[in-house]
Structure formats: C-alpha cells, structure tokens
Image: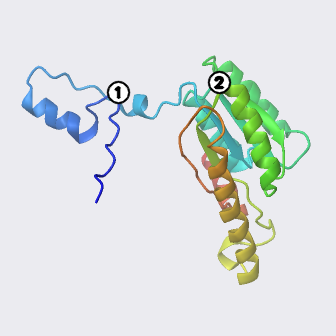
C-alpha cells in the first residue's frame, strides 16, 4: 500500500494547538494570534454565483474584505442591481486592492460557465475560490413547507452547480478548492438582512 501524501505545512506554523504545545515547551515563545493571517485571501481570485444580491453578494463582499484581488459575481440579470453597484463602490473604498466584477451568465449552462471561468483564469492567472450561492427557490414557497418535487428541482440544480463550480477551479495557473452552497429562502434572506 502506498504511503499517504505528505500534508502541507502552513507558512504561519506553528498554528492552533501546535502553537500552544510549542509555547508550553519554550518559555521564550511569544504567542501571537494567527487566525486572521491564516484565513486571509490576499491576491486570491474567485467566482460567486448568485452574486448580484442577497447571500451571494454578502459572500462576495466578505471575500473582498478578506483581501481577495477580484471576485466575479455570476448572475442572470443582464446588468447588476443598484445594490451590487453600491457594494462594488464600497469595495473600492476599502483600498485593499479588491474589486468586484459582474458577469451576466446562466450557471446552469456548463459549457458557457466553464468558458467564462477559463477566460477569467487566463486573465487573472489563477482561480482560487468558487462559492455556489445561486438558487432557484420560489419566493412564494416557505422553505419549511417545500413540496417534494419542487425541492428535488432545487437540489438537482444545486448539485449540478457545485459540480460545475468544482470544474471552474481548474482554470488559471493556481487554484484551491473552496465551494459553499447556499440554498436560501425568503425567510433566511430576510433574517440575514435584519442581522446585517
């Protein structure tokens, strides 16, 4: 049986419990929080489906706040919403080099999606993060009372998009895997707006 692959070591090591154990053995070890450095997205590039509004736009903004160079918001409308435009202006004011880009595309179309991801990967020379936040939930249906057939449609769409998203990460010279799937509901989205 072949040996398991060697795990990569963070350039910030030691981190977590390893740092605590190192501090216990070395009285000169100076503890320093590293969590924000470990999760920093400096110079990363990503795609967020459903990024025109709601949870997708919130996730795109969070990625920019974490230092991403560019986050491409994929969504169906031919032009971005006023909410998206104002958020993109806000991102510029962060002055951390981040930017939001809007792409009108149907993420159910695998060939078009991969072609656009290839174009972005070639331009940016990397593709690090894909967030699957697009949804096809019906605004008139409460998520707790979804009819089975309607739920199966939503589930099929979401599983397809996650698979398509995984394929997008192969475009660009460098990539990592990070997919999140968000099946929102009107109730969830309204609650999220009240918290945010």
x, y (%) of residue 55? 67, 49
Structure colour scheme: rainbow
Helix, strand or loop status at disc 1: loop
Quadrant location of the C terminus in the rendered image: top right
Q: Most extreme residue toward the right, as rendered?
A: 78
Helix, strand or loop status at disc 2: loop
Q: Quadrant of residue 89?
A: top right
Q: Nearer the viewer, residue 23 or 125?
A: 125
Quadrant location of the N terminus in the rendered image: bottom left
x, y (%) of residue 165? 66, 51
Residue placed at 65% from the left, 24% from the top? Answer: 98
Q: Quadrant of residue 126?
A: top right
Q: Earlier in the sequence, mark 1 or mark 2?
A: 1
Residue that numbered label 1 is attached to:
11
Q: Most extreme residue toward the front, as rendered?
A: 1
Q: Do we see residue 140 in this rendering?
A: yes
- Tally of numbered tags: 2
Which mark's residue is nearer the viewer, 1 or 2?
Answer: 1
x, y (%) of residue 24? 10, 33
Disc 2 packing (10 Å; few <14; some 14–19; many ≥20): many
Residue that numbered label 2 is attached to:
98
Q: Quadrant of residue 109?
A: bottom right
What is the CA distance from the residue labelled 1 to the residue labelled 2? 23 Å
Residue placed at 34% from the left, 47% from the top? Answer: 5
């Amino acid at each position: 049986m072949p040996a398991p692959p060697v795990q990569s070591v963070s350039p910030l090591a030691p981190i977590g419990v390893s740092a605590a154990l190192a501090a216990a053995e070395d009285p000169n070890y100076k503890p320093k929080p590293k969590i924000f450095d470990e999760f920093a997205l400096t110079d990363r590039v990503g795609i967020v489906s459903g990024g025109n509004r709601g949870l997708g736009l919130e996730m795109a903004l969070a990625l920019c706040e974490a230092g991403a160079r560019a986050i491409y918001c994929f969504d169906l409308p031919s032009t971005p919403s006023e909410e998206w435009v104002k958020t993109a202006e806000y991102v510029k004011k962060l002055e951390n080099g981040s930017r939001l880009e809007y792409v009108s595309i149907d993420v159910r179309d695998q060939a078009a999606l991969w072609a656009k991801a290839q174009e972005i990967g070639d331009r940016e020379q990397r593709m690090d993060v894909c967030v699957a936040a697009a949804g096809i939930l019906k605004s008139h249906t409460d998520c707790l009372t979804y009819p089975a057939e309607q739920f199966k449609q939503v589930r099929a769409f979401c599983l397809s998009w996650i698979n398509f998203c995984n394929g997008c990460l192969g475009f660009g010279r460098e990539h990592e895997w990070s997919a999140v799937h968000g099946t929102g509901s009107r109730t969830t989205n309204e609650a999220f707006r009240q918290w945010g």
